[in-house]
Every structure is written in structure tokens, then in C-alpha cells.
Image: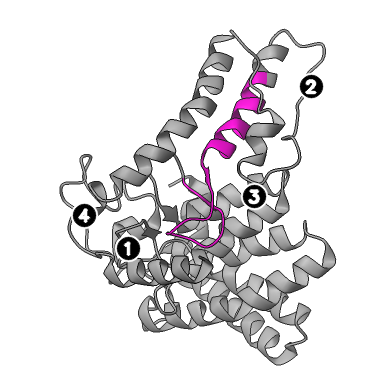
């Protein structure tokens, strides 16, 4: 059975469309079945919002997704809105659980979706989602990040992947930073295993960025506004996104800064793996890029003047 599932995943990977609007229509049968089960979870969240019931996830519900421990709990004492804070905190983790997907034809590991309307594995969403999961279940956090790496296209980590669709783009390179945070929350043996299996794909991803997203001056550019994750902004488009700006010749301060963060993470990962030479190379490259950002993308006088 496991071999058949792997074969189906390979077929899906080969058949995914990277253009058009296939993703808007594909996979509706599978999603419909998943939706029916998630009605139970969403009904609990809705009841909690209205104050009819406390927002809680019984052990039998948690076990459906392999979760053995209850979510973190917030207790507020001596505040007029204590109940509101407690319910809001509980809702965060209920939503986190609702958006966790079990291993399926898309991914061999559990993976996270940003919400019901976005049923795919997104690069930078997964990086942030994993940071919340690590306080509840660090193993789930690790799987959420592994899914992004497992679904890479060659050496490129993809912007988004669904059952029948994959993106031509990437997104802010935050998986290295996110992985380090999760690794620090795992038991030593699990942390080492995760480090050993993810370092090389991330090292190759950085090389891909250097070859495909780096300008001649050493800074980085977005190939498309959607890569930034914040495309609905004046520097990228008009208000309804009907006219998108060509960003391929524009040095992006955010992208370049994300790369510094990734280089720092890769250096730390390399040192933990006793790859001193590679660690030193990443550290040196990060230092050069920091200096280039300060030199070309930062004006201290305008910053002081608030302009």
C-alpha cells in the first residue's frame, strides 16, 4: 500500500499544472470529504466564539491527526476581559489544529494550510505556522516544514503546491530560520536527524536563489510580486492588482534581508554538522550582503527625518 501511495504521489507531481486555473477546480472531491470531517472542528470553534461552549478539542479528536497532548492553555486572572483573552487563545490553537492536514497524496508528512480557502502548502505561511506548532508539538512543526522541502521543484522551494497545481515562483526564504527554531525545541536525537536531512536541500536552495534571484550588484529581486507575500502594496501593484509591476530589475530590501537570515541559519546548521568551512563561507557571504544592503538600500538621513 505504501508503495502504491508513493507511486500516486509521483504521478501527481508529474501531472501538476504550473499555469492556468486548474487549481481552482481540481481536487474538489477530496476536499469535500475532508470538509465534512472538519465541520466537527469548525462547529466547536463557532460555538466557542458565540460563548455557547468552551473551545476545546477532545483527545479523540486530537488523535485523528496524531496529536497526543492537549494544546497550550492560557489562564487570565484579575482582568475584566479574562474570558475573552482565554477564548481567543484557545481559538488560535483550534484553528491551528483545523488547518493541519494528515499525510495524503500531496505530502508524505502532515502539512499545514493557511486556511480553508487556501488548500495548499505555502512556503512562508508554513514557516510561521511551524513557530506556533513548536510550542504545542515540535514534531508536527518539523513535519510542516519538511513538507515544504519535500515538495520542492528541483532545488527551488515553491511558493505553493496543491494536489494538481504548482507555482513557478518561490517565496521569502524563511524555512532555514524556522527549522532552527524547531530544532531547538526537539529532543537531541530528533533534532540531529532533522538537521541532517534538511541542510543539504536548503544549501542547494540558497545556490538556486543565487543563480536565479540575484542581481549583478549582489542584492536580490522578486521575479513576481506574488513571491514577496505582500503583493497588495503600492510598490507592486495598483489597488485591485490589475496592473502588476515588473520587479525583476528592482533590488528588494526585504528579499535581501530574508537571504541574510537564511545565510545565518545555514551557517549555524553547518557548524552543528561540523561543516566548519561551509559555515564560514555562509557567514562571510551574509556579512557582505548586510554591508551591501546598508550601502545601497538604507539612507540614514531620510530614516531620521521619517521620510
The residue closer to the viewer here, 156 or 207, is: 156
Local packing at callout 2 (Cα closer than 10 Å; few below 14, some 14-19, many 20+) is few
Please determine whether, in this image, residue 43 is positioned above or below residue 169: above
Q: Earlier in the sequence, mark 3 or mark 2?
A: 2
Q: Secondary structure at mark 4?
A: helix
Residue 261 is left or right of residue 173, and the answer is right
Nearest the eye: 119 or 296: 119
Q: CA distance from mark 1 to mark 3?
A: 24 Å
Mark 1 and mark 2: Cα distance apart in space? 42 Å
For the residue pair 242 and 217, the one nearer the viewer reads as: 242
Mark in the foreground, 1 or 2: 1
Q: In the rendered structure, find residue 86 and report the number of the disc placed on it.
A: none
Which stretch appears magenta?
A: 87-113
Question: Residue drawn at (55%, 22%), measured in percent from left and top?
Answer: 45
Q: Residues within 10 Å of mark 1 (few under 14, many from 20)?
A: many
Position of residue 228 measured from the top left corner of the image (x, y, whole percent): 39, 57
Residue 154 x %, y % = 41, 79
The mark nearer the N terminus, 4 or 2, is 4
Q: Nearer the viewer, residue 300 or 102?
A: 102
141 displayed left or right of 10: right
Instruction: Describe residue 34's horizontal placement relative to residue 146 as left or right.
Output: left
Q: Which residue is mark 4?
A: 22
| Structural crowding at the residue carrying mark 3, measured as other residues with C-alpha within 10 Å and reported as few (<14), some (14–19) or many (≥20) | some
User: Is residue 279 among what the camera can see?
Assistant: yes
User: Can you identify the residue that label 1 sits on?
Assistant: 166
Tag of residue 131: 3
Dot 4 crowding, Cα within 10 Å, few <14, some 14–19, many 20+: some
Which numbered dot is residue 75? 2
Judged by depth in the image, the label closer to the viewer, 3 or 4, is 4
Amino acid at each position: 500500500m505504501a508503495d502504491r501511495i508513493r507511486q500516486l504521489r509521483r504521478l501527481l507531481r508529474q501531472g501538476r499544472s504550473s499555469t492556468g486555473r486548474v487549481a481552482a477546480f481540481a481536487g474538489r472531491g477530496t476536499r469535500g470529504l475532508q470538509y465534512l470531517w472538519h465541520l466537527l472542528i469548525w462547529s466547536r470553534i463557532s460555538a466557542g466564539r458565540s460563548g455557547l461552549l468552551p473551545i476545546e478539542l477532545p483527545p479523540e479528536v486530537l488523535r485523528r491527526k496524531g496529536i497526543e497532548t492537549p494544546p497550550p492553555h492560557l489562564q487570565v486572572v484579575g482582568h475584566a476581559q479574562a474570558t475573552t483573552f482565554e477564548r481567543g487563545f484557545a481559538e488560535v490553537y483550534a484553528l491551528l489544529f483545523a488547518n493541519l492536514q494528515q499525510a495524503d497524496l500531496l505530502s508524505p508528512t502532515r502539512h499545514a494550510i493557511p486556511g480553508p480557502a487556501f488548500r495548499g502548502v505555502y512556503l512562508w505561511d508554513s514557516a510561521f505556522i511551524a513557530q506556533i506548532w513548536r510550542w504545542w508539538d515540535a514534531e508536527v512543526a518539523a513535519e510542516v516544514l519538511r513538507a515544504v522541502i519535500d515538495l520542492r521543484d528541483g532545488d527551488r522551494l515553491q511558493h505553493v503546491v496543491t494536489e494538481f497545481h504548482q507555482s513557478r515562483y518561490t517565496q521569502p526564504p524563511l524555512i532555514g530560520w524556522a527549522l532552527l527554531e524547531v530544532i531547538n525545541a526537539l529532543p537531541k536525537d530528533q533534532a540531529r536527524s532533522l538537521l541532517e536531512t534538511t541542510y543539504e536541500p536548503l544549501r542547494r536552495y540558497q545556490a538556486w536563489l543565487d543563480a536565479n534571484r540575484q542581481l549583478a550588484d549582489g542584492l536580490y529581486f522578486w521575479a513576481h510580486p506574488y513571491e514577496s507575500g505582500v503583493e497588495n502594496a503600492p510598490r507592486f501593484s495598483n489597488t485591485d492588482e490589475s496592473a502588476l509591476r515588473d520587479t525583476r530589475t528592482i533590488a528588494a530590501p526585504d528579499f535581501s534581508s530574508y537571504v541574510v537570515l537564511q545565510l545565518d541559519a545555514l551557517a549555524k546548521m553547518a557548524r552543528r554538522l561540523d561543516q566548519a568551512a561551509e559555515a564560514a563561507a555562509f557567514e562571510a557571504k551574509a556579512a557582505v550582503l548586510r554591508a551591501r544592503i546598508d550601502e545601497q538600500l538604507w539612507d540614514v538621513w531620510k530614516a531620521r527625518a521619517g521620510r
